[in-house]
Amino acid sequence: MKKYSLLFLTGGTIYPSLEILFRGRTDISMAAAGGICLCLIDRVCCQDMKYRPLELRCFAGSGIITSVEFTIGVLVNLILKMNVWDYSQLPLNILGQICVPFSILWFAATIPAIGLCSLFEKSKVFAK
């Protein structure tokens, strides 16, 4: 439980920080998305798929991030009308909430996420 709390806080800090760096703004929903994504990547890509090829783990990570982004996007952008982001001008988008170019970016972003989760796993803080 302690590990997932720290993973959630880490992902919830990194993702909005990257948004501020590249977009100049963020939203609290991005902190939630980052935390959820890092916890799921740890569980799926670092535990369940630990011995699978990196490419397959990155594909799974991209699917995780894209799914979380779609779910949160539908909630905050379409239902709550907060207009946090809109990918409708990008190619191959679904409802303006997800798109193929960002899913490809999430594939690559899974590599450092896996590395971060591995560091958490090796940390003596989480020794059983």
Image (cartoon, rainbow, N blue to C red):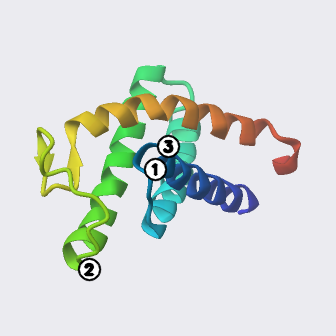
Report the side of 64 relative to 87 (left or right).
Answer: right
| Residue appearing at x 78%, y 36% in the figure | 122
- Res. 21 visible in picture: yes
| Residue appearing at x 40%, y 48% in the figure | 23
Q: Which residue is mark 2?
A: 80
Q: Secondary structure at mark 3?
A: helix
Quarter occupied by the N terminus: bottom right
Q: Position of residue 44 (x, y in %)?
A: 49, 43
User: N-terminal of the two: label 1 or label 2?
Assistant: 1
Q: Position of residue 115 (x, y in %)?
A: 63, 31
Front residue (pair 125, 111): 111
- The tag on residue 90 is none
Confirm or deny contact between disc 1 and disc 3 (CB under 8 A).
Answer: no
Q: Which residue is mark 3?
A: 44
Q: Residue furthest front?
A: 24
Report the side of 6 relative to 74 (left or right).
Answer: right
| Residue appearing at x 51%, y 55% in the figure | 16
Residue type, label 1:
Glu
Q: Position of residue 41 (x, y in %)?
A: 51, 44
| Residue appearing at x 29%, y 38% in the figure | 103
Badge 3: residue crowd in 10 Å (few <14, some 14–19, many ≥20)? some
Q: Secondary structure at mark 2?
A: loop
Q: Quadrant of residue 74?
A: bottom left
Q: Residue furthest bottom?
A: 80
Residue type, label 2:
Leu
Nearest-to-viewer mark from 1 and 2? 1
The answer for how far apart the CA atoms under marks 1 and 2 are is 21 Å
From the viewer's perspective, is residue 108 above or below residue 123?
A: above
